Amino acid sequence: MTDRFPTADSVLDALTKGGGGAYFGEPVTVLEHSLQAAWFMERKGGSPALVVAALLHDLGHLLHGEGEDAADRGLDTRHEELAAEVLAGHLPAAVIDPIRLHVAAKRYLCHANPRYFAGLSPASVESLALQGGPMNDAEAEAFLALPHATEAIALRHADDAAKVRGLAVPAADAYRERMVALWS
Ligand SMILES: [Fe+2]
């Protein structure tokens, strides 16, 4: 398999150059959303791995080639798996697991907290149905037993908050050093 992202800079490049498209019915682009998620995670005191995970959690949306209306067409692109797959050879589990689990974390939170579901954006509700809907008791228990489940939930909260039109946040470069330090 070719290594799609041989360096940390190649990922940042893809995000900054390819992330300008609309973000699935939200009022921000994929890049704005990613930068906001990283910034919110940083302000919450997230570890470097979790801040980098927040920055890259939606990289898969730039890779699946299904277009911005995938959910409208009834398609779950499994973007969380895509991103985890292309990055797994270079970044540690503390980054990869929360990325892979950030959709499961949404399904978990919908099960655990009815108020969480009520606060989801319309686009997020639409994709939830395609992603399997809220977890049941057994699924929730299994999810919580996974490594980095707690971190995935923290990432999910940053993800949900990161949809603010026009919010000024640091650019991707602000996270480069942390990403390079984690990259192998
Ligand atoms: Fe996201």
Image (cartoon, rainbow, N blue to C red):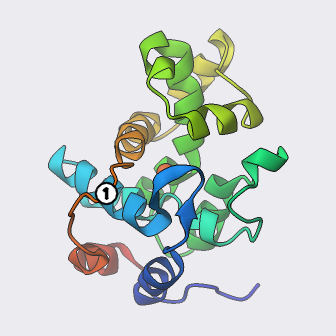
Residue 58, compared with residue 2, is above or below; it is: above
Determine whether, in the image, residue 10 is placed left or right of residue 133.
left
Going 29% across and 59% down the picture, which residue do you hit?
Answer: 166
> Could you tell me the amino acid type at mark 1?
Gln
The quarter of the picture where residue 101 lies is: top right
Q: Is residue 100 above or below residue 89?
A: above
Q: Quadrant of the N terminus?
A: bottom right
Task: Locate residue 65 relative to residue 15 in the image: left or right.
Answer: right
Is disc 1 placed on a helix, strand or loop?
A: helix
Looking at the image, which is closer to me, 125 or 41? 125
Residue occupying the point 26% across, 73% down: 175
Q: What residue lies at 49% left-to-right and 75% top-to-bottom?
A: 20
Q: Which residue is mark 1?
A: 36
Task: Give the image location of residue 73, x and y in percent.
Answer: 83, 49
Number of marks in picture:
1
Residue 89 visible within the image: yes
Position of residue 156 relative to residue 143, above or below, is: below
Dot 1 alpha-carbon crowd within 10 angstroms: few under 14, some 14 to 19, many 20 or more: many
Which residue corresponds to the image point at 21% horizontal and 75% vertical from the top-left? 174
Residue 75 visible, this angle: no
Q: Which of the two residues, 36 or 7, is positioned nearer the viewer here?
A: 36
